[in-house]
């Protein structure tokens, strides 16, 4: 007998060790079997499991366990990413606590410290994934800074450089002034701040007129090289081609026309600072404007500004500039505004657009086959609407900045000679040989100090992890992968770049499907953040409720295209499901139900057992189809409804009289049938809840590990007559129970019911199951008629209209009919009032424009709930 309660902690630890010992997770053991491959998104080596991870890896593990049970040679390729800036930050903080600094240590010593940290503390997220139940091939775990990976990154860089697709250029980048490096857009957080719109008069040359520009950053005006207006803005067309005199600098700059300018925004005239604004940079390129950088790498004004401004921070310079503008009567007005300003997500400092020399990839060229691959269906997005996002990004792609001014990462394989000639080679030896050929003698080379963007190395993940460039069976079998499971926020940063690199170096897409899962929000629909205090730690949830409950809850909420609202209460509620399954299994064991290998489901002779066989057969097919189509929420809900309703509430209840009877043959068949059905249910539930299903499989007498069993392939013949008969019984019981609930019939009160319009066949099957109907619907008498229902009947009788029959139930002596009608009518009025008020808000365009998305969604869901309640009450009233 199993314990009264499921002890998840002990079970999780025990079975995970058993799975690993068995070698179950290893790929390549099933020779001759069809392969199935998922590339695990490499988690940051500094990371800890968060709910987004928990969702991503739960969905992947469901697919992996399901495909493994189908008998495929499954590879779930795991690993971690070196996370350049995040890891460097962690180690820098450690050495600062020791009173040291990165620069004092020097590059080599610092990198030694990083590797020491990685060996001791890095990658703890892998153990956290194991706690979630992730069944990856851990023997094949890869790290993006492994020697093999590093060599491959250099090989790719050199090849792309030789092919003219990697080059060095001076362009604007997101610059983190604290960490002194370029950062990707994904490492930039847009924060709304209170600020000002400064309307500044720029004098027109040889005139007493002014053109007023509106700016939020007057301190950058030292780098202005034009004023731009829209070519069709009639206020300014006569000024296009003239010059303005830049205040303080007394430098003339032209007034130009460009369609980028918005006549409705500010004054319609914009100062153009190409070296300090991304949009201005593009305008500058179109009009051949000079690039004047007026800030240094720390965000302070530099030598291209007047002496008295040099070294000032941007805020100090702004204050000083505004003071001079005010003295010169150049400020027309100042508006208070709120606008978004980019900040480093780790440094917290304002990100500056900075003109620097960086290495770039010609992403536009690489994007062409990546776009074509999705257009032609070689790779499909699920949901399909994400293809639009993918196309929009790739069709408007800019050169990809791949260099970072860090020490931790793949150092750029470029060496500079005495005259700055660059030699791009895979090794220093090759670079020295090329330099020797170039100069005709041995020279000293200095390697580029930059490292590569982590997205560059991770873009190679689908084939480098399979031991590329060496062609091998493993690479051939598992590239391309079957599906990538990830979030929408890295479609551009990772998905698109893997597509580019896979198509360029392997001439094939890296994966056939891309499943984009939903974003996890809190119970109110708000994005989770530490500042809001609404972050939920999945590890604490696993401690409290168990990995199975967390996994099943996440899967059941993962509706495609719909954000997931989660709270601890929802997870706690899902624990009731695991408790229901546990208690049902315990009941079976108490009644001597055990697995019997000789049991044949198609040989059942009892109607209720024949019915459940059909239900189990349909369950396995439905859930399998739903998993194949990435409908995880529908699969979880189907299992939930089957377990709680079909199996526990109906089948177990229906079989209780048989188990209490003295009919030995019926008891034995039903015991075997109950055990067999639970076994099939455990198979279907295993990908979602692996730990509890393993424990129950073992407790019920299952042989071997459930994770190693085959997915049910049930091909026995149909028991259609038995199935139809029991479905009819269930419908009658359900309808009577619903009526009792709607009309407040006391639970203990037995009532009478008459069913009219029955065929002889239906009547016979109901007679056969009359005892069940009377017991479960709380009836004292059940009358059956083949005749049609009478047109007139006793007052206080309610009727339940089914497809081909009518049930009459007299209630005048059971409830106060008049009172119940009044109660229901009042409820309808109340709901109607609430619907009107809610509808007024939902359809108010002004309200919708201001309200957060989660508030709009809540109101729309409330309207749906009101409508459902109203229909239910109207249906109850119609019964009288």
Image: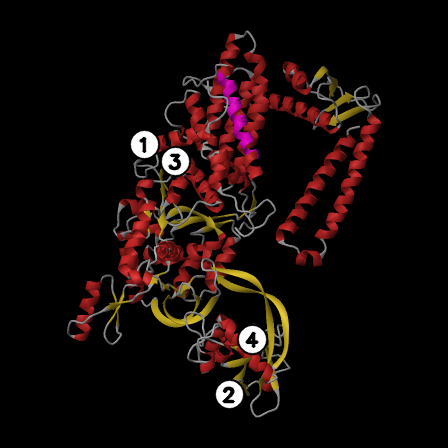
Q: Say which residue label 2 marks.
A: 250
* Residue tagged 3: 68
Estimate the x, y position of residue 41 in percent, counting from the top left.
Answer: 40, 48
Label 2 – label 1 distance at C-alpha:
78 Å
Looking at the image, tell me whether mark 2 or mark 1 is earlier in sequence order: 1
> Which numbered disc flags the more N-terminal residue, 1 or 3?
1
- Mark with earlier residue (4, 3): 3
Q: Could you tell whether 56 is left or right of 114 in the image?
A: right
Which secondary structure type mostly characterizes the magenta part of the structure?
Answer: helix
Residue tagged 4: 259
**Which is closer to the viewer, label 4 or label 2?**
2
Query: For the magenta stretch, what is the residue range?
Result: 573-589
Circle 2 SS class: loop
- Identify the coloring: secondary structure
Q: Which one is earlier in the sequence, the residue at label 1 or at label 4?
A: 1
User: Label 4 vs label 2: CA separation?
Assistant: 28 Å
Residue 21 numbered tag: 1
């Amino acid at each position: 007998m199993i314990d009264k309660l499921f002890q998840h902690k002990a079970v999780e630890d025990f079975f995970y060790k058993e799975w690993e010992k068995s070698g179950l997770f290893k790929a390549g053991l099933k020779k001759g079997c069809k392969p199935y491959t998922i590339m695990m998104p490499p988690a940051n080596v500094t990371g800890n499991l968060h709910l987004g991870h928990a969702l991503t890896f739960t969905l992947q593990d469901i697919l992996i366990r399901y495909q493994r049970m189908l008998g495929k040679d499954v590879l779930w390729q795991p690993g971690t990413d070196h996370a350049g800036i995040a890891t460097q930050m962690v180690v820098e903080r450690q050495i600062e606590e020791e009173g040291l600094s990165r620069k004092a240590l020097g590059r080599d010593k610092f990198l030694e410290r990083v590797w020491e940290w990685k060996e001791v503390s890095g990658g703890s997220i892998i153990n956290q994934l194991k706690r979630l139940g992730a069944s990856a091939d851990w023997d094949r775990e890869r790290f993006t800074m492994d020697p093999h990976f590093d060599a491959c990154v250099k090989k790719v860089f050199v090849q792309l450089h030789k092919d003219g697709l990697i080059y060095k250029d001076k362009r604007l980048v997101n610059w983190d002034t604290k960490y002194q490096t370029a950062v990707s857009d994904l490492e930039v957080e847009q924060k709304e701040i209170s600020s000002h719109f400064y309307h500044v008069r720029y004098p027109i040359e040889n005139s007493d007129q002014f053109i007023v520009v509106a700016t939020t950053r007057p301190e950058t005006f030292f780098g202005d090289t034009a004023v731009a207006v829209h070519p069709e803005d009639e206020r300014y067309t006569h000024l296009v081609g003239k010059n303005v005199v830049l205040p303080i600098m007394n430098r003339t700059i032209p007034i130009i026309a460009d369609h980028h300018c918005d006549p409705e925004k500010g004054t319609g005239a914009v100062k153009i600072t190409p070296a300090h604004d991304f949009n201005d940079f593009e305008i500058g390129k179109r009009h051949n404007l000079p690039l004047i950088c007026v800030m240094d790498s720390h965000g302070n004004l530099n030598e291209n500004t007047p002496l008295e401004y040099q070294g000032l921070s941007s805020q100090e310079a702004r204050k000083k500039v505004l003071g001079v503008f005010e003295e010169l009567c150049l400020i027309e007005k100042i508006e208070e505004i709120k606008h978004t300003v980019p900040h480093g997500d780790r440094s917290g400092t304002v990100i500056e657009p900075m003109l620097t020399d960086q290495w770039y990839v010609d992403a536009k060229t690489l994007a062409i086959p990546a776009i074509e691959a999705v257009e032609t269906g070689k790779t499909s997005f699920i949901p399909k609407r994400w293809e639009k996002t993918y196309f929009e990004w790739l069709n408007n792609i800019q050169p990809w900045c791949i260099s970072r001014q860090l020490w931790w990462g793949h150092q750029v394989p470029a060496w500079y000679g005495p005259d700055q000639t660059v030699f791009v080679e895979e090794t220093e030896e090759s670079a020295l040989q090329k330099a020797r050929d170039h100069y005709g003698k041995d020279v000293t080379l200095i390697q580029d100090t930059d490292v590569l963007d982590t997205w560059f190395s991770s873009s190679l993940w689908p084939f480098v992890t399979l031991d590329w460039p060496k062609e091998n069976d493993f690479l051939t079998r598992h590239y391309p992968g079957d599906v990538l499971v990830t979030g929408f926020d890295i479609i551009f940063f990772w998905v698109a770049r893997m597509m580019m690199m896979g198509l360029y170096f392997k001439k094939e897409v890296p994966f056939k499907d891309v499943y984009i899962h939903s974003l996890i929000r809190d119970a109110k629909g708000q994005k989770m953040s530490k500042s809001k205090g609404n972050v939920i730690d999945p590890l604490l949830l696993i401690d409290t409720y168990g990995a199975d409950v967390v996994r099943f809850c996440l899967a059941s909420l993962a509706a495609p295209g719909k954000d997931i609202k989660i709270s601890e209460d929802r997870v706690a509620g899902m624990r009731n499901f695991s408790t229901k399954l546990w208690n049902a299994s315990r009941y079976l064991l108490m009644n001597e139900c055990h697995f019997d290998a000789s049991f044949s489901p198609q040989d059942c002779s009892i109607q209720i057992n024949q019915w459940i066989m059909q239900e189990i057969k349909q369950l396995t097919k439905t859930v399998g189809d739903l998993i194949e189509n990435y409908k995880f929420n529908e699969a979880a809900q189907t299992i939930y409804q089957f377990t709680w309703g079909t199996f526990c509430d109906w089948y177990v209840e229906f079989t209780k009289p048989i188990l209490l009877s003295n009919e030995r043959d019926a008891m034995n068949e039903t015991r075997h049938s109950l055990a067999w059905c639970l076994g099939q249910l455990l198979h279907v539930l295993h990908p979602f809840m692996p730990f509890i299903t393993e424990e129950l499989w073992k407790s019920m007498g299952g042989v071997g590990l459930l994770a190693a069993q085959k997915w049910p392939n049930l091909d026995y013949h149909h028991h259609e007559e038995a199935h139809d008969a029991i479905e009819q019984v269930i419908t009658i019981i359900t309808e009577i129970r619903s009526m009792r609930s709607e009309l407040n019939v006391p639970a203990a009160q037995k009532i009478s019911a008459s069913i009219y319009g029955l065929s002889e066949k239906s009547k016979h099957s109901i007679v056969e199951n009359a005892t069940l109907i009377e017991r479960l619907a709380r009836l004292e008498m059940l009358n059956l008629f083949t005749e049609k229902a009478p047109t007139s009947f006793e007052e206080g009788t309610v009727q339940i209209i089914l497809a081909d029959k009518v049930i009459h139930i007299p209630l005048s002596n059971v409830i106060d009919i008049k009172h119940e009608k009044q109660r229901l009518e009042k409820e309808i009025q109340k709901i109607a009032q609430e619907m009107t008020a809610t509808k007024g808000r939902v359809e108010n365009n002004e309200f919708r424009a201001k309200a957060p998305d989660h508030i709009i969604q809540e109101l729309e869901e409330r309207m749906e709930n009101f409508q459902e309640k109203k229909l239910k009450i109207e249906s109850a009233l119609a019964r009288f």
